[in-house]
């Protein structure tokens, strides 16, 4: 490819990224980079990376100058608080009844789950944790502690198998 063709291609790419940035900024749906956008500009589990989520959370916090409060210790405590708020929505539910017991709480479950995830990703960002790598390592360790032939269908701890 010649220099002029390469320059034209790069200029077009930059223009496209700027158009996407402008469009997403005006709708409030910018998620970090064009690869994480869906047709309607919303994030979803299928197309949004952990890195994009961390970036969006970091930008949100930076705009509000909240980083000053986000030590790993404070964020670890905040995860517990947010998880308790999620758990509260299931308080007094029977195991065989609707979950949560009150239908109006369903939307709050999603909001509280998001709070837990946001706080966890924030902790990972501040503590330098690569969450995907940590999950992979943990699953490998758990596979050794809970081999399928012994653990399948069992509620026992690894040292009780």
Image: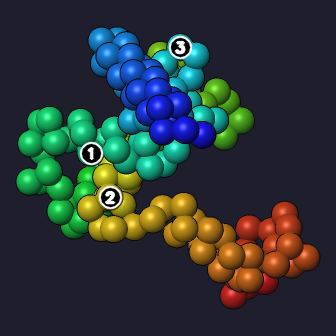
Element assignment for label 3: loop
Element assignment for label 2: helix
Q: Where is residue 57 in the image (x, y as percent from the top left)?
A: 31, 41
Q: Which residue is drawn at 25% across and 57% down?
A: 75
| Residue picked out by circle 2 | 125
Q: Which mark is residue 75?
A: none
- Circle nearer the N terminus (3, 1): 3
Q: Are marks 2 and 1 in contact (CB under 8 Å)?
A: yes
| Residue picked out by circle 3 | 40
Q: For the image shown, how many numbered marks are present on the structure?
A: 3
Q: Distance between the residues labelled 3 and 1?
A: 23 Å
Q: Position of residue 134 (x, y in %)?
A: 52, 69
Task: Tell me: residue 20, above or below residue 88.
Answer: above
Q: Quadrant of residue 137?
A: bottom right
Comparing 3 with 141, the one in front is 3
Q: Residue 58 carries which label?
A: 1
Q: Residue at x 48, y 48 (%)?
A: 50
Q: Distance between the residues labelled 2 and 3?
A: 27 Å
For label 3, count other residues whose C-alpha is less than 10 Å away and answer few (under 14), some (14-19) or many (20+): few
Task: Tell me: residue 146, above or below residue 135.
Answer: below
Comparing 96 with 25, the one in front is 25
Q: Residue at x 33, y 68 (%)?
A: 128
Q: Distance between the residues labelled 2 and 1?
A: 8 Å
Q: Which residue is drawn at 35% across and 22% down?
A: 18
Q: Where is residue 54 in the image (x, y as percent from the top left)?
A: 37, 47
- Circle nearer the N terminus (2, 3): 3
């Amino acid at each position: 490819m010649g220099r002029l063709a390469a320059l034209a291609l790069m200029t077009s790419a930059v223009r496209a990224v700027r158009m996407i940035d402008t469009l997403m900024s005006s709708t409030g749906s910018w998620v970090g980079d064009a690869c994480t956008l869906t047709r309607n500009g919303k994030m979803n589990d299928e197309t949004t990376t952990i890195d994009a989520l961390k970036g969006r959370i970091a930008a949100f916090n930076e705009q509000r100058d909240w980083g000053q409060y986000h030590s790993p210790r404070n964020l670890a405590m905040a995860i517990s608080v947010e998880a308790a708020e999620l758990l509260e929505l299931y308080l007094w539910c029977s195991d065989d009844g609707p979950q949560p017991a009150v239908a109006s709480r369903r939307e709050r479950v999603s909001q509280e789950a998001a709070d837990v995830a946001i706080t966890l990703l924030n902790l990972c960002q501040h503590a330098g944790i690569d969450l995907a790598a940590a999950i992979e390592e943990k699953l490998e360790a758990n596979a050794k502690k809970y081999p399928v032939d012994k653990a399948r269908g069992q509620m026992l701890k690894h040292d009780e198998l």
